[in-house]
Image (cartoon, rainbow, N blue to C red):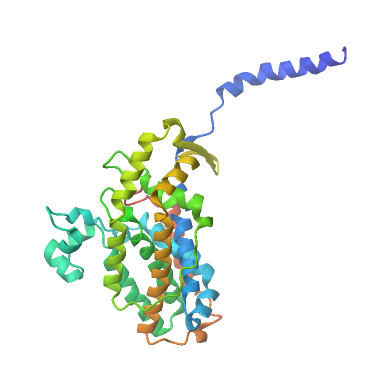
Amino acid sequence: MANLFPFLRINLLTVFFLLPALLLAKPLPVKPLSSEAQKAVWGFFGHKRINRVAVFTLPPEMLGFFKEHIEYITEHSVDPDKRRYAVEGEEQRHYIDIDHYETEGEDPFVHVPRRWDEAVAKFTEDTLQSYGIVPWHIGIMKLRLQKAFESKNVDLILKYASEIGHYIGDAHVPLHTTENYNGQLTGQKGIHGLWESRIVEIDAEEYDYFVGKSVYVASVLDFAWEAVEESHRAVDSVLTIEKALTAEFPSDKKYTYEQRGSVLVQTYSREFCEEYSKRLNGMIERRMRQAIIAVGSIWYTAWVDAGQPDLSTLTNTPPSAELLKELEELEQLYQHAEHKGTICD
């Protein structure tokens, strides 16, 4: 027993001197899960998954080139989001608040002309830019990709193929089609990240990615508008189901805390996400699957309209130093510039 007293004395002294420091120490920071933290997922994860899987929808004449560059096409699917928060004029390419154009008894998809010039004549370009231009921008990006195929410019093929996948993916998200994009108008702030990020983070490995083969799209403009319309028809379900679940769900079980790097963040609990996903009846998986086949189909359409150039002549051609420099500059802007546009916490 005598040998035990020095041990106890040392440990009691340790506690005596360390306890004040422990009590005064700053706790690990806790904050809500921001859009930056959510970008691991549709968010960033979802866009990367869409582009990557879309490669395997392509015909053999395109598959070799796209598989060779699959890592680039995957990683740079998120470049438009990096520009969205760093470059003026990028944000509105990701959405359209189609419900802004609703009038008494008239469907906004009837009220808003699909053709850009007709929509400008009716609403002015400033108005269109203010409430989003994603269906029109998809058409612009398709033409850019087509020209890149025609000139066999590897840098531009990679750049435009990666980026058009992002805009097509956004057009398949219901909350990219409404002014209530983050539930901020209905007391549901945070639902944007819940739908397109958190649930994808949890469920993505269970999704079925066998979506079939890409097809030729006769009218890219109509195709983009149809994707937006299908997304918008789901907005009411996205919002009302979440509101009903929140009313029923124990308030102390809706959120949880998770470690993200050195920060402890508040996010939706797995239990809440699983029940919400169940009530949505597979909606998020369906929208992602449709986005994948849409991306592959627009790539294929741009290649066909370019005259089906022989992409095998472009093998073993890496991105140029100029493109890599441009990407590094974008990364610096994204990491260090003041963020612009709407951030959906």
Q: Is residue 184 above or below residue 75?
A: above
Q: How many marks?
A: 0
Q: Residue at x 34, y 39 (%)?
A: 244
Q: Say which quarter of the image contains residue 225.
A: bottom left
Q: Residue at x 15, y 69 (%)?
A: 118
Q: Is residue 163 above or below residue 181?
A: below
The location of residue 24, given as percent across then percent down, is 56, 22
Q: Is residue 64 left or right of residue 94?
A: right
The location of residue 18, given as percent across then percent down, is 65, 21
Q: Residue at x 31, y 64 (%)?
A: 227
Q: Nearer the viewer, residue 3 or 299?
A: 299
Q: Say which quarter of the image contains residue 5.
A: top right
Which quadrant is home to the N terminus? top right
Q: Residue at x 44, y 36 (%)?
A: 254
The location of residue 27, given as percent across then percent down, is 54, 29
Residue 269 visible? The answer is no
Query: Which residue ends up furthest to the right in the rendered image?
Result: 2
Q: Nearer the viewer, residue 49 or 93?
A: 49
Which quadrant is home to the C terminus? top left
Residue 53 visible? The answer is yes
The location of residue 248, given as percent across then percent down, is 38, 35
Q: Is residue 273 above or below residue 3?
A: below
Q: Say which quarter of the image contains residue 233.
A: bottom left
Q: Is residue 112 left or right of residue 60?
A: left
